[in-house]
Image: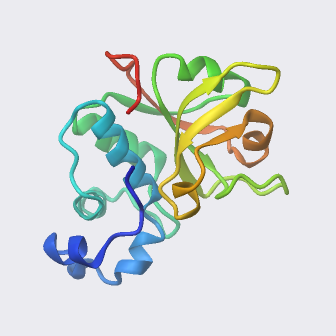
């Protein structure tokens, strides 16, 4: 599991200091940490979050709130994992997870209070049922302690935007 909080050692080793404040960038690195996990799952070389951040800055992928979906998809494709940023209906998520993980935009901790989006996590599988259980990887501190959520809880915080990937050849997300 990759974390979005960049350690001081990684930041210094990979020249992150040239970008400014480590904590400020860490707070916007959920998409890049998720991308790193995707690259690892597909057996690709996975740059550190700091290296991905530098690449994202160079390619103008970042906004004040975080990385653009299309930019992450472009970086993933450039790094060897074919990817597309596209709308995906919440009802379609389990079927899409049958072949490949997704990076989706949700509200951190999946609240059901009407807020949606702003945080990127990986959906990596599901258990079928009346209210399917969605398995996820979340690079935030909260996500280090949580790994599944009912679809009914994910739905209110999901924006309907996803980054989709080519099917996994081994059929499993690590």
On the image, the x and y values in percent for residue 26 come to: 41, 71
> Is 8 displayed left or right of 166 in the figure?
left
Residue at x-position 71% and y-position 52% = 110
> Is 97 displayed left or right of 169 in the figure?
right
On the image, the x and y values in percent for residue 114 come to: 83, 54
Colouring of the image? rainbow
Is 27 above or below relative to 58?
A: below
> Is 57 displayed left or right of 136 in the figure?
left
On the image, the x and y values in percent for residue 99 come to: 47, 17
Label tally: 0
On the image, the x and y values in percent for residue 76 come to: 31, 39
Residue at x-position 22% and y-position 70% = 10
Q: Nearer the viewer, residue 139 or 102?
A: 139
**Which image quadrant is residue 81 in?**
top left
Residue at x-position 41% and y-position 59% = 3
Q: For the C terminus, which image quadrant?
A: top left
Is 103 above or below relative to 108?
A: above
Residue at x-position 67% and y-position 38% = 160
> Is 44 displayed left or right of 29 in the figure?
left
Is 10 above or below relative to 98?
A: below
């Amino acid at each position: 599991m990759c974390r979005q909080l960049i350690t001081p050692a990684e930041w210094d080793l990979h020249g992150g200091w040239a970008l400014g404040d480590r904590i400020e960038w860490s707070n916007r690195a959920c998409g890049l940490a998720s991308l790193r996990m995707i690259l690892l799952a597909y057996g690709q070389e996975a740059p550190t979050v700091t290296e991905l951040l530098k690449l994202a800055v160079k390619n103008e992928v970042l906004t004040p709130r975080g990385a653009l979906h299309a930019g992450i998809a472009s970086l993933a494709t450039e790094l060897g994992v074919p990817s597309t940023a596209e709308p995906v209906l919440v009802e379609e998520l389990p079927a899409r997870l049958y072949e490949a993980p997704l990076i989706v935009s949700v509200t951190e901790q999946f609240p059901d209070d009407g807020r949606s989006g702003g945080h990127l996590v990986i959906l990596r599988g599901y258990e079928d049922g009346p209210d399917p259980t969605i398995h996820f990887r979340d690079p935030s501190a909260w996500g280090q302690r949580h790994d599944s959520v009912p679809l009914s809880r994910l739905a209110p915080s999901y924006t309907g935007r996803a980054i989709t990937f080519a099917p996994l050849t081994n059929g499993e997300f690590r």
